Amino acid sequence: MGAITLLDGGMGQELINRGAPRSEELWSAWALLEDPGLVAAVHADYVAAGADVLTTNSYATFDNRLGPFGLADRTEELTRLSGSLARATVDAAGGSVRVAGSLPPLRHSYNPEPDGTYAQLHDEYLQMVGHLVDHVDLFVCETMGACFEARAAADAARTTGKPVWVSFTLQGGEGAGLIDGTSFSEACSVVDADAFLLNCCPPERIATALPLLRQATNLTIGAYANAFHQMPVGWRGRDGSPLPEARTDMGIDPYTRAVMQWVDMGAEVVGGCCEIGPDHIARIRQVLDA
């Protein structure tokens, strides 16, 4: 087994598990507004667990998410704060942990048809990239369901000269490609990235799709799953769709076994998404090191 890069786990659900309000509208941005120390504490716990990469808490800090709550004028402030909190945690810990700037879907997660053109999304991603670039070592365009949105995010991140990872979600799809119907082969050929990952969908869906992703690219591949029950097609948390309950069968050891299955399939980057916390990451670290 070669060196495996271990990502951190989820942030939004971990904040909720630690007492943050369960707000699908503001999601993890609430803590940046009201309790940034809580974000720093989660980051620190992931470093202590053995993560090689921390992800910025910028998944909900863009105009389209904050605007409806009268917070559009704080987009830059909160995005920069998400970067500085992760960077400060890494600097305080020393060592070689890297910071990945999260570039999320800008028109709802799990959305195969984002409202906006490539050019519009690219311009918005350029703003996020500019707010994060001084704090991060690389960018991860994550939970991407539409190929043109993934291209827009990756192209914006490329302008920095820093490594770019792109992670597709399979939530609501069949697992044979992106949820907008694009095959992995096509997506990997038109999206400019240094690594292709799968995230924020069930571990079982990843196990089915990862071999197809491996066939589609010679670049680094990886995965980080959630531990939610399946979300219905068309789920939109910001529009009031209730968040599915967490699974009770995806504890530390079952999730670690799933991750090690992905490693056996060729995954070189692994970690966790929603409902996967520091204890999961610590166990994966232990097994990888063994």
Image (cartoon, rainbow, N blue to C red):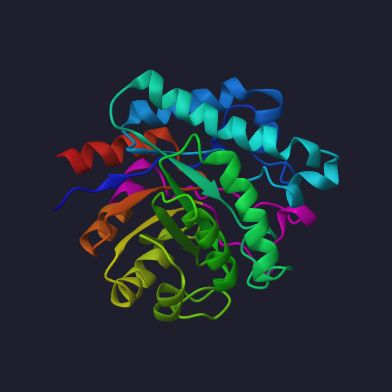
Percent of width and height locating residue 200: 50, 56
Q: Which residues are magenta?
A: 228-257
Q: Is residue 132 left or right of residue 256?
A: right
Q: Inspect this view and state whether residue 171 appears.
A: no
Is 78 above or below relative to 200?
above
* Quadrant in the picture for the C terminus: top left
Count how many numbered circles sit on residues in the image. 0
Instruction: Write the residue at 23% across / 36% down.
Output: 286
* Quarter of the rendering containing residue 144: bottom right
Instruction: Say if 2 sits above or below 211 in the image.
Output: above
Q: Position of residue 266 (x, y in %)?
A: 24, 63
What x and y, as percent, mark residue 54? 42, 37
- Residue 211 vertical position relative to residue 7 in the rendered view, above or below: below
Determine if the magenta segment contains residue 250.
yes
What kind of secondary structure does the magenta stretch mostly adopt?
A: loop
Q: Nearer the viewer, residue 155 or 144?
A: 155
